[in-house]
Image (cartoon, rainbow, N blue to C red):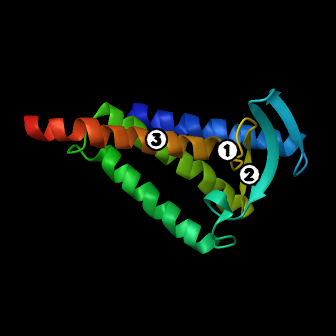
Amino acid sequence: MQFLYLLISLFVILADQGLKSYIVTNYTIGEVHQVIPGILSFNYLQNNGAAWNILTGQMWLFYFISVVAIAVCLYFLFNKKYKNSLFDVGLSLVLGGIIGNFIDRIHLKYVIDMLQLDFIHFNIFNIADSAITVGVIIIFIYLIVFADKEDENA
């Protein structure tokens, strides 16, 4: 079953890197094009920090955090003690997102961001960031709603 979860991670990585490649090939930095008017635009940015551009230029820290986070995700995915499909899907999304941004950091020394929500003033992000966010939300839902019930049944 872990193979399925690794496929989810691989899909996130390929989608993330594919869109980043498209943006780099077809846009200049700062160029904005509406995808869904009033909702979503592509806006090509290079981010050498973390979320909200914090810790700008601290690549060594991001490398370390990424390696540790990848190891933790793989540990939980392959540990038979922690088997729940909702939890594993969340971990798979987080793992794919971490690797997607890690590839950029190693290869480019920055992360390519391009997704801009036009209906709200929010930071520009990418597919990897979205996968991490959705994955963490899924993990929290599992921990809040289902983890205690599983402990009671064990």
Crowd class of label 2 (few under 14; some 14 to 19; many from 20; radius 10 Å): many
Classify residue 10 as left or right of residue 50: left
Spatial separation of the CA atoms under disc 3 and disc 2: 20 Å
Q: Nearer the viewer, residue 90 or 95?
A: 90
Label 1 to label 2: alpha-carbon separation: 7 Å
What type is the residue that disc 1 sits on?
Answer: Asn
Instruction: Estimate how packed mark 1 is, as few (under 14), some (14 to 19) or many (20 or more) residues with alpha carbons within 10 Å.
Output: many
From the top left corner, tell me how far across and down residue 61 is, in percent: 56, 72
The x, y position of residue 134, in whole percent, is 50, 39
Q: Is residue 7 above or below residue 65?
A: above
Reading the chain from its start, which is encountered first: label 3 or label 1?
1
Instruction: Report the amino acid beneath label 2.
Output: Ile
Q: Earlier in the sequence, mark 1 or mark 2?
A: 2
**Is 90 left, or right, of 117 in this rendering?**
left
- Pointer 1 with pointer 2, Cβ within 8 A: yes
Q: SS for tag 1? A: loop
Q: Is residue 154 visible?
A: no
Q: Which mark is residue 135?
A: 3
The quadrant where residue 42 appears? top right
Report the Cα–Cα distance between label 3 and label 1: 14 Å
Q: Earlier in the sequence, mark 3 or mark 2?
A: 2
Q: Which residue is mark 1?
A: 126
> Circle 2 is placed at which residue position?
112
Q: Residue at x 36, y 43 (%)?
A: 140
Q: Classify residue 101 as left or right of residue 33.
A: left
User: Can residue 81 be seen at all in this image of the molecule?
Assistant: yes
Disc 3 residue type (three-letter): Gly
- Residue drawn 48% across and 46% down? 94
Query: Tag 3's secondary structure?
Result: helix
Q: Quadrant of residue 118?
A: top right
Residue 46: x %, y % from top left: 77, 57
